[in-house]
Image (cartoon, grey):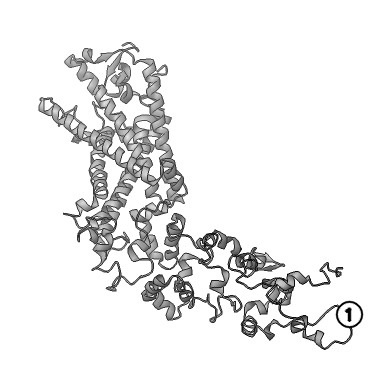
Amino acid sequence: MSDRRYVRRFGPFERLQHVGLFVAFLGLAATGLPLLFSDAVWARPLAQLVGGFGVTSVLHRIFATLLIAIFAIHVAWIGLRLFRGERGLLWGATSLVPQPRDLVDLYHHVRWFLRRGEKPAFDRYAYWEKFDYWAVFWGMLIIGSSGLMLWFPEFFARFLPGWVFNVALLVHGEEALLAVGFIVTIHFFNSHMRPGKFPMDMVMFTGVVPERDYARERPLEYARLKVTGALESRLAGPPDATFVRRARLGGAVAIAVGLMLFLLILVGFLQ
Amino acid sequence: MTRADGRPVVVEPKAFAMSAHGPFSCVDCHTDLATLSEFPHPDRLAAVNCAMCHDAPGAAFMQSVHAAIPAAAGGPAQCVTCHGPPHQIKPSADPESPTSKLRVAGTCAQCHGDTVVRGAPRGPAVAAQFADSIHGMALTRTTVAPTCSDCHSSHDIRRTTDPESRVHALKVPDTCGTCHGSQQRLYGESVHAELLRSNTPAAPHCVSCHTAHSIRPTADDQWQLSAVEQCGTCHREALATYRDSFHGQVTALGFTPVAKCADCHQAHRVFRAEDARSSVSPANRLTTCQTCHPSANLSFVRYQPHANKNDRERLPALHYAARSMDALLFGVFAFFGVHSLLWFARERIGPADDARPPHE
């Protein structure tokens, strides 16, 4: 098995969705957090930095529209794949849908943390990746719907009582804290910054992972690809060096912005 | 010829003739000169008593704070302190007079221009505050604007704590109302005016919100934001819950195009919410919200602009939403926090069997 052999894990469309997702997400966080922490020392300067109230509120809505669009496109894309008869999307080893096996994996993974057993063999999507994936759905439902209510209160008041906006504002902010906090601490750690991946797992940017790593990290998926003979069609050469450099830079900026926002949240809480 | 202190011995006849006292002879004021027979007269004549003629201003002055300045702070002010050299005295209508409308502020600033005068504290540097205020700015264009004496009066100047003072809390609305009559009428109906009339010391009046000397145009953003804080000095709970709302967050960031206290509750006609006259009474609420939200309906105004998420009685939905979110955040971070820490420890300390090859 040569070091120069890579396996394609994510297609260009998936990678593009990931970039769009984090650009919109960080944009929303940067334009929304000053409001949530309006009494923090950094709130006024940050709001001024991103353009003052008129601009922040417009930017927040632009990023929100982008995020909703990406989400809608993603759901439509999954729908299209289902319509075309693609198998293994909704259940089974290659599905992102949580299944009993994920609980078993979690149990064995924790046992491995504690040196009480072997590391479990993961399939295409590990349980923490499934959590990340569905967290976006949950977040979109909660933040997206509450955000739309706050954006168009007069429209929603036609069929919702006014106190719903009280709940919407609270939930919007709390869920945003959860999302930013989760992405910046848990997702960054699980997928990028843990010692085995530090500082960044490039697979979501380049789409490919060294075959040797894939075989070790996703043994079940790798074995299946081999057995079914699909591996050959998924093999690729190393990613373009210039592209990797640019992707690293972009990823590093995103991680830096995320960590900075998290720091501001901490300051806001401690103040 | 000059005296030891540099002042001229001789009264400048031309200037004296031009002064308000020009028609009078020396002995009309210096009554002790009339009784003298030997000249040249002694260096020091008896102090002139202006009240001989100016009896009403003189009597008023004797009641004023200026007549009671202790010796340690320089002793009582004299007529000439404000009206200028006695032999060149001008009527206040004369623009040259230090007591003319446009020059009064400068005259008062001789003593009230700084926080400390002749070693004695004088309170805030009101002259500078006044110069930058809407009144001070307006005075550079029109004599309609008030100067110091319009509010404090000229001779009968008293401390704000003196019930007879024109700037005593109970008198402030009348004093400001001299020019701002319609605002005074609106305020007069309010619950704040009611409190003031019942002698509540903390009752807000004009100055509480507009300040005394630094009065800004009401369109001024900074002043509008400071007025919100001012309401909060008494209405603490209302300010705290306002700060939790979108309106309050936006204003806390220093932006004004959202509802501030006075936008909903009115600036002057403030009433209790249950009072039918209040702009936030159940009957008027919809109209008030529609100022900014033109297509708001009755359901819309069931929004609680001062929501307290800890108030389970009043807003059960918000209360339980808040508790649920707390539990969700705690649950997620506790679970994944421990998960990540254990993972970190395993990969950091244990054999890195999930680590990428060293050459990668």
Residue found farthest to the bottom:
B35
Amino acid type, label 1: Pro
- Of the pair A270 and B97, the residue shown nearer to us: B97
Q: Residue at x 28, y 58 (%)?
A: B291
Q: Quadrant of residue A78?
A: top left
Does residue A159 sit above or below A23 in this rendering?
below
| Position in image of residue B45 (x %, y %) | 81, 81
Question: Residue at the spot x=41%, y=27% of the render?
Answer: A199
**Residue A171 vertical placement versus B136 (above, below):** above
Q: Is residue B155 left or right of residue A145?
A: right
Q: How far across and down, in percent of the image, does residue B93 sit?
A: 60, 71
| Element at label 1 | loop
Q: Chain of mark 1?
A: B
> Looking at the rendering, in which quadrant would you find the N terminus of chain B?
bottom right
Mark 1 highlights which residue?
B40
Q: Is residue A66 above or below residue B114?
A: above
Give the quadrant of the C terminus of chain B: top left
Residue A11 lies, with reference to residue B37, above or below; the image says above
Q: Image point 37% across, 72% down: which residue?
A: B186
Residue A193 visible (yes or no): yes
**Where does the image place residue B352, in percent across and percent down from the top left?**
39, 25
Q: Residue at x 28, y 17 (%)?
A: A7
